[in-house]
Image (spheres, helix red, strand yellow):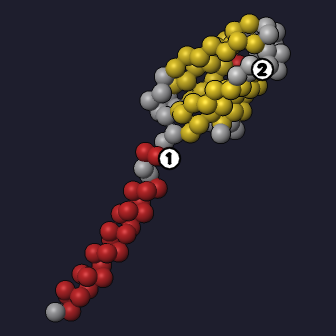
C-alpha cells in the first residue's frame, strides 16, 4: 500500500519536471524578431532557424542587401564606402545590432 502512495507523489513530480523542461526547450524560444529601419520605413520580421529571405533596403546611397538564413541576419552587400555594416557580423552573434550610417539603415534585434 505504501508503494502506491509513493507513486502518487512521484508521478506528478515527474510530470511537472517534464512540462518545465519541455517549456524551456520549446520551439517558441527558437525565434526572435528584428527591426529593419530605413529613413522611409520600418519592417519587423520573425527570424527562425528555417527563415530564408533576401531583403533589399533602399537608402540615400542605393540598395543594401540583407540576408536571413539559419537563424542569423546580416548585411551581404551595401553601397557605403567602408562596408562597416558588412563587417559587423551576424545577428544574434554580434549583440543584435547592425548599422549602415552612410545609407541610413539600422537592423536590430527586438
Identify the element where label 1 is drawn: helix
From the viewer's perspective, tell me whether residue 19 is left or right of residue 29: left
Which residue does the numbered mark 1 point to in the structure image?
A: 29
What is the spatial separation of the Cα atoms under label 1 and label 2, in whole angstroms? 31 Å
Task: Tell which residue pokes out farthest to the front in this image.
Answer: 40
Task: Please say if 45 is above or below 67.
Answer: below
Of residues 76 and 51, which is closer to you in this image? 51
Looking at the image, is mark 1 or mark 2 earlier in the sequence? Answer: 1
- For the question of whether residue 15 can be seen, the reply is yes
Q: Residue at x 83, y 15 (%)?
A: 102
Residue 96 location, x and y as percent?
Answer: 68, 36
Crowdedness of circle 1 by 10 Å Cα count: few (<14), some, many (20+)?
A: few
Residue 65: x %, y % from top left: 64, 14
Residue that appears at 26% across and 82% down: 8
102 or 36: nearer the eye? 36
Local SS, label 2: loop
Nearest to viewer (mark 1 / mark 2): 2
Q: In which quadrant will I find the C terminus? A: top right
In the picture as drawn, the residue positioned furthest to the bottom comes out as 1
Q: Residue, x 38% and y 67% (percent of image)?
A: 17
Q: What is the quadrant of residue 101 in the picture?
A: top right
Mark identifier at residue 39: 2
Between 45 and 86, the residue placed more toward the observer is: 45
The N terminus appears in which quarter of the rendering? bottom left
Residue at position x 69%, y 9% in the image: 63
- Pinpoint residue 105: horizontal percent, then vertical percent: 75, 21
Where 31 falls versus 105 (above or below)? Answer: below
Q: Residues within 10 Å of mark 2 (few under 14, many from 20)?
A: few
Amino acid at each position: 500500500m505504501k508503494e502506491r502512495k509513493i507513486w502518487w507523489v512521484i508521478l506528478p513530480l515527474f510530470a511537472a519536471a517534464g512540462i518545465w523542461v519541455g517549456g524551456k526547450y520549446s520551439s517558441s524560444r527558437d525565434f526572435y524578431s528584428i527591426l529593419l529601419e530605413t529613413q522611409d520605413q520600418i519592417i519587423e520580421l520573425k527570424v527562425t532557424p528555417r527563415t530564408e529571405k533576401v531583403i533589399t533596403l533602399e537608402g540615400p546611397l542605393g540598395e543594401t542587401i540583407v540576408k536571413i538564413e539559419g537563424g542569423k541576419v546580416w548585411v551581404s552587400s551595401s553601397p557605403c564606402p567602408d562596408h562597416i555594416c558588412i563587417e559587423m557580423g551576424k545577428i544574434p552573434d554580434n549583440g543584435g545590432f547592425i548599422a549602415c550610417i552612410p545609407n541610413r539603415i539600422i537592423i536590430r534585434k527586438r
